[in-house]
Amino acid sequence: MAEVTLEGVSKRFGAVQVIHDVSLTIADGEFVVFVGPSGCGKSTLLRIIAGFEDASGGDVRIGGRSVRNEAARDRGVAMVFQNYALYPHMTARQNMAFGLKNIGTPKAEIEARIAKAAAILQLEPYLERRPNALSGGQRQRVAIGRAIMREPDVFLFDEPLSNLDAALRVSMRTEIARLHHRLGATMIYVTHDQTEAMTMADRIVVLRAGRIEQVGTPIDLYDRPANAFIAGFLGAPRINLIPATVKAVSGQRLILEGPGGFTLEAEARPGSAELGAVVTLGLRPENLTPAEHGEIVGTIDVVEQLGAMQLVYATLANGTSIVAEQRGGFAPAIGATARFAVGTGIRHVFDAKEQAITAQAAPVSTPKTMLAEGPEMSGGDVHGRA
């Protein structure tokens, strides 16, 4: 059993509090990604779980037992670091064996574990090479192999792909996802890259300023963000956030007026918006397309050619920047005035405090994703009491 539970965890460095009363449960065998901007506390929280940092308050439980007072080596976790942390004078085989050799593990068992880890990670041809004779991806696989050797209850990854080039990051994402499928182990992964979070996670934990903003599956957070920060952080290109005014209200139905006088219908929770209220309309780029009779008018700034798809960037009458997807056809000319049609996807609405009031942004609770008790927010499971 390798369930990980955080109960009211906080962390201070002197007078500065960087983690604020975080409560979270990660199920046995789950792949959870901590994501957020630099300085949000995600790596600090991971280091507290690992035992490299002491919590200032609260408790950490792994497999049902409190590990707050246990040393890192006794917690049953293995960390994979951003910088690989390989000994340059040792071969890949020796690096992988080093930790077990130090604690007196029999040689035959070490060799058996090396063979198993090398087969999983396809490292057999590289075991006798030193790190300087390995590519970045191969070094990272050796570091992951060293973690596998320990047969931990929990794998911890601290931005392990940030030193790799773009193509290698994509292939390593796939390898780590396959590794999780093969091992079925509990994995906690820290990244600032929302694409890594969206493509790898069973659940994503979005942090900001040391607090959990929202927890949910990738599709929950993408389709049902709790606030404008989460909507803007997840998704590439970013969501379009357009100021608008409520012109009519009928139950869940709102009529919104945006820059340049366009009007658009959206749905919000009953009673969440009043006539005349200033709100923010959120439209994903895939829900916005250049079209002759579109509702929204803008001036074309840039067109990015991506093969089968083009990203069209434009500026609205009030200076708001937007981006739309176009598949096929001729790209509009830079500097030209163009219209954009809004598709049938979700039209997100955020109030003056940037909280989601979209009708679809209802709380989600299932047995697998239920967390420690805490305040509810719209759009997924949310915990981390402030």
Image (tube, rainbow, N blue to C red):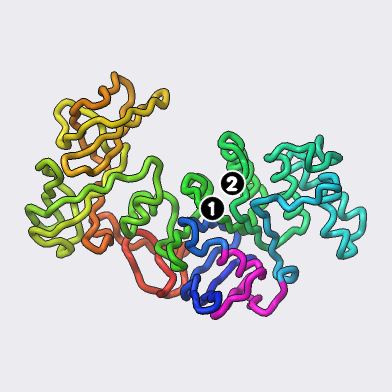
Question: The residue under label 2 is which amino acid type?
Answer: Ser
Task: Identify the residue position indicated by label 2 in the image.
Answer: 162
The reply to whether discs 2 and 1 touch (Cβ–Cβ < 8 Å) is: yes
Residue 305's place in the image compared with 197, above or below, is above
Residue 68 among magenta residues: yes
The residue positioned 18% from the left and 31% from the top of the image is 339
Left or right, 37 with reference to 287:
right
Residue 73 location, quadrant: bottom right
Question: The residue under label 1 is which amino acid type?
Answer: Thr
The residue positioned 62% from the left and 50% from the top of the image is 160
Relative image position of residue 317 (x, y in whole percent): 16, 40
Q: Specify start and end residues of the magenta stretch as a single range.
A: 44-71
Q: Nearer the viewer, residue 293 or 40?
A: 40
Relative image position of residue 173 (x, y in whole percent): 58, 43
Residue 64's place in the image compared with 93, above or below, is below
Residue 353 location, quadrant: bottom left
Helix, strand or loop under label 1:
strand
Label placed on residue 253: none
Relative image position of residue 114 (x, y in whole percent): 82, 48
Q: CA distance from mark 2 to mark 1?
A: 8 Å
The residue positioned 51% from the left and 64% from the top of the image is 41
Can residue 1 be seen at all in this image of the molecule? no
Residue 197's place in the image compared with 137, above or below, is below
Q: Crowding at label 1, few (<14), some or many (≥20) Cα neighbours within 10 Å?
A: many
Task: Identify the residue position indicated by label 1 in the image.
Answer: 191
Can residue 122 be seen at all in this image of the molecule? yes
Helix, strand or loop under label 2:
loop
Q: Crowding at label 2, few (<14), some or many (≥20) Cα neighbours within 10 Å?
A: some
Residue 302 among magenta residues: no
The residue positioned 26% from the left and 23% from the top of the image is 332
